[in-house]
Amino acid sequence: MEPEISIQRRKSRQIHVGSVPVGGDAPISVQSMTNTDTCDVDATVAQIRRLEEVGADIVRVSVPTMDAAEAFGKIRKQVQVPLVADIHYDYKIALKVADEGADCLRINPGNIGREDRVRAVIQSARDHGVPIRIGVNAGSLEKELQRKYGEPTSDALVESALRHAEILDRHDFQEFKISVKASNVFMTLQAYRKLATQVEQPLHLGVTEAGTFRSGTVKSAVALGGLLLEGIGDTIRISLATDPVEEIRVGFDILKSLNLRKKGVNIIACPSCSRQNFDVIQTVNELEARLEDINESVDLAVIGCLVNGPGEAREADVGLTGGTPNNLSYEDGQKSHHVKQEDLVSELERMVRAKVQKMRDDEAKGIIARSE
């Protein structure tokens, strides 16, 4: 087998967002953001729980008003995942959510105003032991930088980020992470590459306003995949105009494709052609839906014919190759048994779940440790 290429990650300072380490040698975390009205506590809690169920490491919640800050405190008490409070300009809201249990404050210190306000927010973060996220966006650069550069550029994004970072440095506060997001793939790539050489803090990767589920996934995979291959990035958010649950799934899929995280069932499937002995597309779609609840790392190969099937199936934990009259299943690289067409989905699900149960049993016995 071809040896796997090991990605050499950029060395960064490690911070903690609640119980989740970000930076250093910690796994790259995957996060999303709620799109409910924060003041609707029940709806927001329900959405956060759905994000928890699909494995979100961190969830961000917008807190635009003091009423939303009050609601944030109620939400914090009802969920387990670390919460980032997203705040713009109003330092009093930052102080309130810190008291309410926020695990991170997303607020740019340079936008708060007077020095005493900046100092108050930094001291509150220090007292509560929570980090700050500097979030620079190409669509909301400072007016001075807009005049200087004429339009959003990677240099403008980096200069903005360094200005905010300098304020935190001046107050001897190093527990922060930085993002420099743009909707343009090339600007995103260049901004993060430049910033990575100038700071030691962890970097939060994302393509802002990436677009719809399909186009946004492609743009995010290209930009974030390129950066991650270069070792840049400590936490990621995929910004899609769709259900936030899909952002988490896409984020983990990107990391899995680079062997940076292994979480859930990795389905290897052929695109299907006239050689297929069963409907591959329908089979894998149904399997993906049935196996969404599994967090353990399992490779499942579903190949429709005997040309590439045996080779792919032997490399997976569980595999299936199409055949006549019956399809042949594989387990841990060995031929297992034949499977009838009408039993394909149910039998593969059974095999995967049996594999997962064995992994859990072995872990309980202390034989292996979880990859996450």
Image: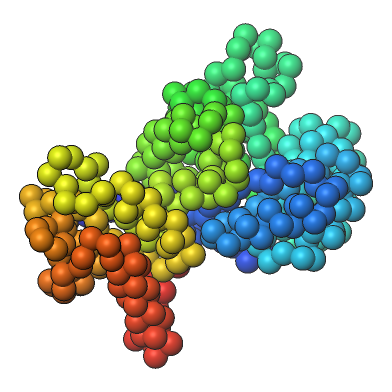
Give coordinates of residue 114: x percent, y percent: 88, 34
Quarter of the image for residue 166 reads top right
| Tally of marks | 0
Question: What residue lies at 68% left-to-right and 31% top-to-bottom?
Answer: 163
Left or right: residue 323 versus residue 260 is: left
Quadrant location, the N terminus? bottom left
Q: Which one is in front, 274 or 84?
A: 274
For residue 220, say whether it is visible: no
Q: Which one is in front, 186 or 64?
A: 64
Q: Is residue 133 above or below residue 157?
A: below
Q: Is residue 360 above or below residue 304?
A: below
Question: What residue lies at 21% left-to-right and 72% top-to-bottom?
Answer: 331
Give coordinates of residue 62: x percent, y percent: 76, 43
Question: What residue lies at 91% left-to-right and 46% top-to-bottom?
Answer: 67
Give coordinates of residue 290: x percent, y percent: 44, 61
For residue 296, say whether it is visible: yes
Give coordinates of residue 15: x percent, y percent: 60, 57
Question: What residue lies at 53% left-to-right and 46% top-to-bottom?
Answer: 246
Left or right: residue 61 versus residue 357 is: right
Left or right: residue 318 versus residue 265 is: left
Quadrant location, the C terminus? bottom left
Quarter of the image for residue 148 reads top right
Q: Is residue 312 above or below residue 154?
A: below
- Colour pattern of the rendering: rainbow
